[in-house]
Image (tube, rainbow, N blue to C red):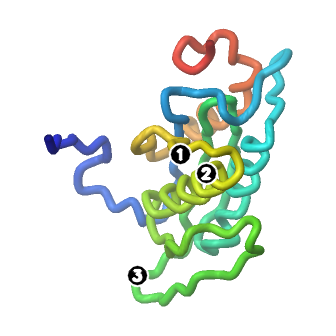
Amino acid sequence: MIRNRKSIRLKGYDYSKQGLYFITICCHNREHLFGEILNGTFLPGEAGIIAQQYWQQIPIINRHVILHEFVVMPNHLHGILELVGVQETEPIEPIETPKSHQFQKIIPRSIGSITRGFKASVTKWARNNMGIETVWQRNYYEHIIRNDQSYIMISEYIINNPANWDKDRFYGR
């Protein structure tokens, strides 16, 4: 049976447009694959370290992305991505990266393609090194950051996320 899934994206919005985007990506079934929180501090496991490294490679793969605050948690990731200087007519070639940390051959131009490339890379690593087939929930959450007040609030939320883990009814155990 094929389901018609409703898009959670803002209808008519161009997600390759310059701007700031708050992204949340959750593990499949909220499994704790990336590490643990101890005394309000995230202690990454091997998969958590890989997720952090792949996230930090996003601006290497796509020179039109600036990373802002981000945090990898036991079962999800929060981050702010900024798209800058995107020109529709500008050709983009994949950038070679070390084979141990190479993104899939997706040339990112939008938040969706950047997120897909990140998720695919972590999934490929997890399949090859942990025998885990499904790392991520389908899709991801995004929020378009439209003003300084929103940016400050979201940045503080990301920075304080590990310290607030025990209070988080949605993600914590």
Q: Residue 50: give x, y in percent of width and height.
A: 74, 51
Above or below — where is 26 with respect to 21?
A: above
- 119 left or right, relative to 74: left
Q: Where does label 3 land, which residue? A: 88
Image quadrant where residue 31 sits? top right
Q: Amino acid at mark 3?
A: Glu
- How far apart marks 3 and 1 lie (CA) works out to 35 Å
Residue situated in front as seen by the camera: 82 or 102: 102
Q: Is residue 52 above or below residue 164?
A: below
- The amino acid type, in three-letter code, at marker 2 is Arg
Check whether the beta carbons of the residues at disc 2 and disc 1 lie within 8 A of each other: yes
Callout 1 secondary element: loop
x%, y% of residue 66?
Answer: 65, 62
Residue 77 appears in which quarter of the rendering? top right
Q: Which residue is mark 2?
A: 127
Image quadrant for the N terminus?
top left
* Secondary structure of the residue carrying numbered label 3: loop
Distance from label 2 to label 3 (Cα)?
35 Å
Residue under pointer 1:
133
Q: Which label belongs to residue 18?
A: none
Above or below, 20 against 48 in this view is: below
Residue at the image point whose x is 60% and y is 59% from the top: 121
Residue 73 percent coordinates (x, y): 69, 32
Q: Earlier in the sequence, mark 3 or mark 1?
A: 3
Q: What is the secondary structure assignment of the residue under circle 2?
A: helix
Q: Earlier in the sequence, mark 2 or mark 1?
A: 2
